[in-house]
Amino acid sequence: MKIIVVTNQKGGVGRTTTAVNLAHGLALRSRRVLLIDLDPRGHCALALGSEPQPGVYRLLGANQPLRDVLRPSGRPYLVLLPSDKRTRTAQIVLLSEGRLSRGLWLNALWPLAWRDLDYCVIDATHVLSALQEAALYAADVLIIPASCDYLSIEPVGEMLDIFQTINSEGSTCQLLGILPTFYDDQTRESKMILAQLSADFGEYGILPPIHRATVFRECPARGKTIFEYAPESRAAREYADLATRVEDLCSKFETNREKAMRLGSAASHRKDITDRLRRITGTLADPSAQRTAPLGLPTTTPLRTGDK
Ligand SMILES: Nc1ncnc2c1ncn2[C@@H]1O[C@H](COP(=O)(O)OP(=O)(O)OP(=O)(O)O)[C@@H](O)[C@H]1O
Ligand SMILES: [Mg+2]
């Protein structure tokens, strides 16, 4: 299983739209996908036509088994770990019990998800809380959506700083690229921002833009993904292409964990998780243990390069 985190510290950039449609796009290719919502507003559930629920809280705050808190999405191959306002409480509980760690998600997804899923797509909100930070440390692949407006350029730079920081601290996360969203080829502003993103961050990879389209606004109101609401639209094609890119990138690298699973070696599978946790926590963390090293980074303020 590869963990894909969709994140940007700026709000309203199309993060949930990207996470939900990417997750469904992969599921439509018969990949087994878990969509994790870290937004206390529960937007992923709403976008899929269901109600926000305290899935993240029950998993992390109340220690319920992962298999008990996952919810069917009503779509083949796609399950949801939903969120609601109690996701904030989960973080408080984890903090008070000393269970917040960089290995949080690797621990939480152990062992069920690794065996039963191909992808885990995480919709991380724009507030960099400890839950989001731990998601970044767990990520195999990062996608940074950036709306095509002037104010979105600086937050992309901040996200790239964070990406470099976590990789310098032992993560092996790959950047799929910056995903321009709300692109309107009729406006000079969109063209200018795309050119600016390419000039400033081209070395990190600029993905083909997702165009601004009214159908995207209509989807959550109907509780449908773009593939259900407007399957023949350009908007659907753009997210299908994104799913293809994710698959292409992910097929190019195999984590040691996946190799162990392919070879059917439970022992080396377990060792890989342990090694990975050790790399990101700097401790001899055991995936089955409740406690790993604390994050050691500010949990309420954004993490920037240089923050250690
Ligand atoms: N390419 C697009 N064209 C037009 N509307 C879009 C597009 N992408 C997303 N939207 C709409 O813009 C709004 C914000 O999108 P979305 O919720 O995906 O952003 P977000 O980054 O998750 O926001 P938040 O910071 O509130 O979590 C939603 O109403 C969504 O339907
Ligand atoms: Mg959102």
Image (tube, rainbow, N blue to C red):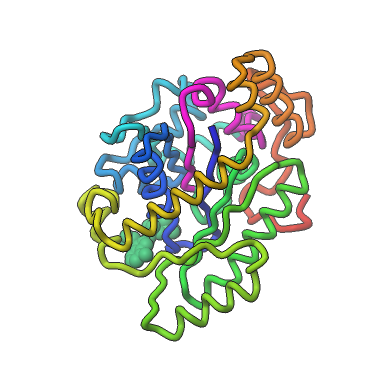
Q: How many marks?
A: 0
Residue 79 placement (x, y as % from top left): 37, 32
Residue 72 placement (x, y as % from top left): 31, 30
Whether the magenta-drawn stretch holds residue 111 is answered as: yes
Q: Which residues are magenta?
A: 95-123
Query: Is 18 on the left or on the right of 124, as rendered?
Result: left
Which residue occupies the foreground of this view, 47 or 60?
Answer: 47
Q: Quadrant of residue 158?
A: bottom right
Q: Is residue 15 above or below residue 254?
A: below
Which residue occupies the foreground of this view, 134 or 264?
Answer: 264
Identity of the residue drawn at 65% across and 60% down: 160
Whether the magenta-drawn stretch holds residue 120 is answered as: yes
Q: Residue furthest bottom?
A: 188
Q: Is residue 306 above or below residue 139?
A: below
Identity of the residue drawn at 70% across and 58% down: 304
Q: Quadrant of residue 184?
A: bottom left
Identity of the residue drawn at 50% across and 21% down: 112
Identity of the residue drawn at 46% across and 20% down: 65
